[in-house]
Amino acid sequence: MKPPAFDYLRAETTGDVLDGLAQQGGDARVLAGGQSLMAMLNMRLAKPKLLIDIMRLKELRQIERKGDAIVIGAGVRQADLLAWPQLAETLPLVALALPWVGHMQTRSRGTICGSLAHADPSAEMPLTLVALGGEVLLRSAKRRRRVSAKDFFAGMMLTARADDELIEGISLPLVKGSRVAFREVARRHGDFAIVACAAMRTPTGVRLAVGGVADVPTARDWPVLDGSALDDALNAFAYELGARDDVHATARYRRDLVRLIGRDLIGEVLR
Amino acid sequence: MTRLKADQRHSVRFTLNGRPVEGEAEPRMLLSDFLRHQLGATGTHVGCEHGVCGACTIVVDGMLTRSCLTLAAQVDGCELKTVEGLAPSADRLGVLQQAFRRNHALQCGFCTAGILMSLDHYLATHPAPTEADIRDLLSGHICRCTGYTPIIQAALEAAAQLASSTKETSDA
């Protein structure tokens, strides 16, 4: 399978990217690490007229601390973030989830923001963004805007990004001192998640975010719960996610995983 | 800013296993096809063409790379290493390749080039890997012949050999 024909633009400034997107709109796609987009092109699930390669832009390769948040640029590869010395201290949930993204051979090139743009419902980075309540930084030739994680994911592989917008980066709040936990069930490490869960302690209780079940990663906040109250809350949440049967797992199995992993992780973060 | 037209071929230059190479490619040409068809470097194999099987894995600017998920145009000016760069000379195998041969770590050989590239890259920075480390690395490759056990054995053996050959054994 080979990609369809397209023009290729090697951007040298962010302005090049924004101009290309403004002119070509929905017929243009931004190419970063290519670990999702190139597969979509090879299978001809995407047929853009223009690819805009952003990986030669140094300004998009930054990982910066801005106040109480970490801002990760569109060109930051998954392996770059994993190797960032401050990761475990500032973004412990990302440090737990990132090794589950693809394989070493794809993390070396794939970007954090590319995974968010692709918006696979079982992917770990969208789940992490939703769990942390992060924001996506969008920019077009005309304006800049910030979209919260829960508003960004609009459906299976659908996002709130407009055709002329570049995901310039994301902003993840620091969760210092807050306990976090992550667990995933997949056929093999590195395969798509059947269910992935992230939990964290919040000022008022606990949050559980689930990927791989609903069309978008979904988070739920509760006050501190235990015993049968926690079981009931998890069971209700598992049903609300609307699991479906597919070749990998039944809906019932997915609900089971949400209940079991959810209970384990909440116990872990409240311990 | 460079814009390459879809219906034209454009010059692509990079360094392949230490040698400068050049060829022509349409923007849509995959790096795996460019290596094989334009440069005749057929050591890199093409399996699934969507990044899953790992057969086409090479090293670009020090990064493990699925060449089927990379455009030739993207690597203009980069440094590439492929399986052809592993042997020290035409009639000798490298340490890792010898370990594969000794342990029967390949049968049909289709997946082998990619696996060798992943291991070569990994062992260079991780001289004392555990079996779990090697299994995790190999999760990015699919082999349908060996059942992986001899590959893991070969990798651990090569790692030990490489580590001992870099240790000082004389004060002279």
Image (cartoon, coloured by chain):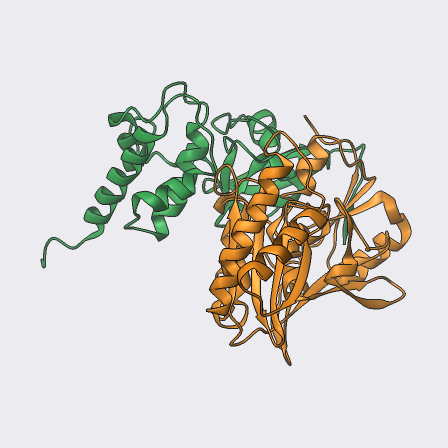
* Relative vertical location of residue A25 with respect to residue A252 in this rendering, above or below: below
Can you tell which quarter of the image residue A193 is in? top right
Q: Is residue B78 visible?
A: no
Which residue is at the front of the view, A221 or B110?
A221
Between B64 and B145, the one lying in front of the other is B145
- For the C terminus of chain A, the quadrant is bottom left
Please say if A225 is above or below A210: below
Q: Give the residue at the far top of this rendering.
A: B108
Q: Colour of chain B?
A: green
Please provide percent x and percent y for residue A227.
53, 61
Residue drawn at (58%, 49%), measured in percent from left and top? Answer: A258
A93 with respect to A139 (left or right): left
Q: Residue at x 51, y 28 (%)?
A: B41
The x, y position of residue A200, in whole percent, is 57, 66
In the image shown, does A38 or A123 lie closer to the viewer?
A123
Residue A145 visible: yes
